[in-house]
Image: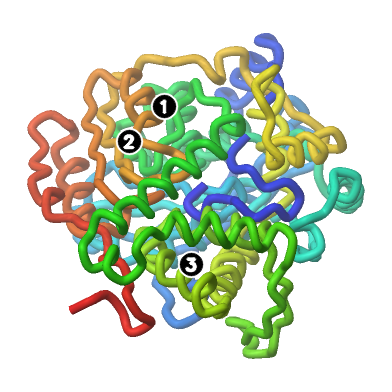
Amino acid sequence: MRFPTLRRRLAVVLLLPLAGSAGAAALAAATASSELPGALALAPCRLEQPTRLQSYAAECGHLTVAENRAQPAGRTLDIFVARVPAISRRKLADPLFVIAGGPGQASSDFYASVAPVFARVGRERDIVLVDQRGTGRSHRLDCAFDDEALLSAGLDSLARAARLCRDTLAAQADLRQYTTGAAVEDLDAVRRALHIARIDLYGISYGSRVAQEYARRHPDTTRALILDGVVAPQTVLGPDMAVDAESALDRILERCRQEPTCRARFADPAADYRALHARLTTRPEPLQLADPESGDRHALAFSDEHLALVLRLASYSADQAALLPLALHRARVDGDFTPLGALYLLATHAIKDQLATGMQESVLCTEDLPFIGNAPRDAQVRALAAVCAEWPRGKVATDFHAPFQSSAPALLLSGGDDPVTPPAEAELAARDFSDHRHLVLPGLGHGQLTAPCIDRLMAAFLDAGTARGLDTSCTRHIRPLPFFTSLAGPAP
């Protein structure tokens, strides 16, 4: 979840379990607690941005762990670890472990894409990045798919693609072992290998689920948590996602209608949306666009499926949301679908290479889908169900979706227009922490890390070691980017 997984690749939903036995969970926990961490030798390295325009100095290495902790003599995995040393020679003892979203994104990739926002924290603390098993450089589990073909594929086609991916990956991995619970024990193995007594955790989107599960299983070694775009432990993702996304889009378009300059330029963007949806349902728009990666011409039959995906993905970012009224209006009034097509290509290319499909399905098919029950299923959840019918399921502890109590301080961050983890999620999660502060930034989307002054708040929170008395006054001035009234930008 940073980089919310809304591609429909196989089944794209985002974050998702099967009730395992308490005995199996207890055995895994006991095995993990007695397991001696292997050697972890770190050497100088550089972490490169996905765009390859910048890189950051770090110390990198691999920690070898059992793929299945109940079978320590079986197959092993090399978990990639990077440590960004603190600037201060008198650094503090508690490093910040940064956990990416998806599920399926590597923490090292995520950090490299946003490294400057961790600079304040990094003055006094090491930052530790552990690529979750199945992602990045930790035995990445991925399959190549024709995304265009799968975007509107039927359930039978999705199931066939899932079987092919499963059979390809099964030769090198037990797909039942790539779950949040296993990842949490990997994190603690890294902590022990680095001889750290207690850690701070930053988790974004799906990473917030990992961070909270770590706090549940390892309360004595959890010092503080920063949860961004929060998924509450009790939440089963899937049934409410379409409703939440539609509500966020409604708020974005209504905000335009309420702003004088935006209303004067576009009148009612929701009307543009409804008209375009009706048209594209029966008549896709042929487009020729320059591919944002290669520059090659890209042929696209822009359909209602593409429109829905663009609107959902653009809603994640307030900056991209600022383009939506203009893009919708140009398509409906001028017949110019280029802005919408460009948004589609930018959004899908931005996440295409960063999400490991196989790991994602192992999480989704184990941790959420089996708990949906008789809740209504939209097309996205039905697609996930078709994939999960073919995918091996791991085990989860019986209390995986239960609330828990933690004395560790927690700073929770929400965007008022988040289309996938609305503020109500953080409110629910906050009940588990006796010491917490929940900040809602109006008009912003999914993930608040790069919003102005959040870097200062995170550093201040970790330095204080409590959410009580935290000065959050700087957030009063945070506003979403004004809506673009032309391709040149917002009105003066």
Closer to the observer: label 2 or label 3? Answer: 3
Find the distance from the CA under tag 1 to the CA under tag 3.
44 Å
Q: Residue under label 3, please give it.
A: 328
Dot 2 or dot 3: first in sequence order is 2
Q: CA separation, marks 2 and 3? A: 39 Å
* Sequence-wise first label, 1 or 3: 1
Disc 2: CA contacts within 10 A as few (<14), some (14-19) or many (>=20): many
Give coordinates of residue 330: x percent, y percent. 48, 75
- The C terminus sits in image quarter: bottom left
Marks 1 & 2, CB-CB < 8 Å contact:
yes
Image spot of residue 326 (x, y percent): 41, 71
Residue found at x 39% / y 22%: 219
Q: Amino acid at mark 1?
A: Ala
Residues 27 and 134: in front is 134
Question: Above or below — where is 444 with respect to 348?
Answer: above
Place of residue 140 in the rendered image (x, y in percent of width and height, measured from the top left): 70, 55
Q: Which residue is mark 1?
A: 215
Residue at (45% x, 82% y) in the render: 53
Which numbered disc, 1 or 3, marks the residue closer to the eye?
Answer: 3
As shown in the figure, which amino acid type bears the numbered disc 3?
Leu
Q: Residue at x 72, y 39 (%)?
A: 362
Q: Which residue is mark 2?
A: 225
Disc number placed over residue 369 in the picture, else none: none
Q: Above or below — where is 466 with respect to 478?
A: above
Query: What residue do we see at 41% from left, 27% from top?
Result: 215
